[in-house]
């Protein structure tokens, strides 16, 4: 019942709204809010940096639950590049992850792609793929191509 209530809160929103809810859920280690961002489809997929591919809500839920057992994730989306259509939206971004060490706060960088589809329940995440980044990922490099092929 709680899942339906949280999902209903996102109906009518935008992919940006779902993305904000996803990162808010990470910041607060809120598993129910995080799972409400995902589509209720068997083929949703998630890959964490250095990890394997998880397919389906059960596998995705289990990995985030294990992650939240160690606390929240302070990942901040930056430099979002969007490719949008009527029924899908792909967000490629850099996640700046704050890690608390004995020497104070440090930052790590993750390159992520979030894919959203417009479903009967509104916009929902169908894929989150994150790869380890480097300090060089703190700034964009390269030029945008003039022709897409």
Image: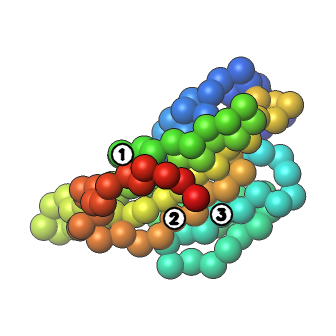
Within-10-Å neighbours for mark 3: few <14, some 14–19, many 20+: many
Residue 62 appears in which quarter of the rendering? bottom right
Identify whether 87 is placed above or below 93: above
User: Which residue reaches farthest left?
Assistant: 103
| Residue carrying label 1 | 79
Q: Can residue 58 be seen in this view?
A: no
Residue under the point 86% across and 31% down? 120
Q: How far apart are marks 3 and 2 (CA)?
A: 8 Å
Residue under the point 60% across and 47% down? 90
Q: What element carries label 3?
A: strand
Asked whether 14 or 1 is in front, the reply is 14
> Number of numbered discs present?
3
Say whether disc 2 or disc 1 marks the residue closer to the N-terminus.
1
Q: What element carries label 2?
A: strand
Say whether disc 3 or disc 1 marks the residue closer to the N-terminus.
3
| Residue carrying label 2 | 130
Q: Residue 148: where, in percent of width, then height?
A: 54, 53
Q: Residue 46 carries which label?
A: 3
Within-10-Å neighbours for mark 1: few <14, some 14–19, many 20+: few
Q: Residue 41: where, in percent of width, then height?
A: 85, 51
Front disc: 2 or 1? 1
Q: Is residue 56 visible?
A: yes
| 144 relative position to 64: left or right | left
Q: Residue 70: where, in percent of width, then height?
A: 47, 64
Asked whether 115 or 2 is in front, the reply is 115
Say whether disc 3 or disc 2 marks the residue closer to the N-terminus.
3
Asked whether 93 or 45 is in front, the reply is 93
Within-10-Å neighbours for mark 2: few <14, some 14–19, many 20+: many
Residue under the point 29% across and 71% down? 134
Quadrant holding the N terminus: top right
């Amino acid at each position: 019942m709680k899942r339906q209530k949280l999902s209903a809160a996102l109906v009518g929103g935008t992919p940006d709204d779902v993305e904000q809810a996803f990162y808010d859920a990470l910041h607060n280690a809120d598993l129910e809010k995080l799972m409400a961002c995902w589509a209720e489809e068997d083929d949703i997929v998630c890959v964490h940096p250095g990890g394997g591919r998880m397919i389906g809500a059960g596998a995705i839920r289990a990995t985030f639950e294990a992650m939240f057992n160690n606390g929240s994730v302070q990942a901040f989306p930056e430099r979002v590049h969007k490719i949008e259509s009527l029924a899908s939206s792909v967000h490629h971004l850099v996640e700046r992850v704050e890690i608390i060490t004995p020497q104070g706060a440090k930052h790590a960088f993750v390159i992520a792609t979030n894919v959203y589809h417009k479903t009967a329940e509104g916009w929902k995440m169908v894929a989150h793929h994150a790869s380890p980044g480097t300090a060089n990922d703190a700034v964009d490099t390269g030029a945008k191509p003039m022709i897409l092929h």
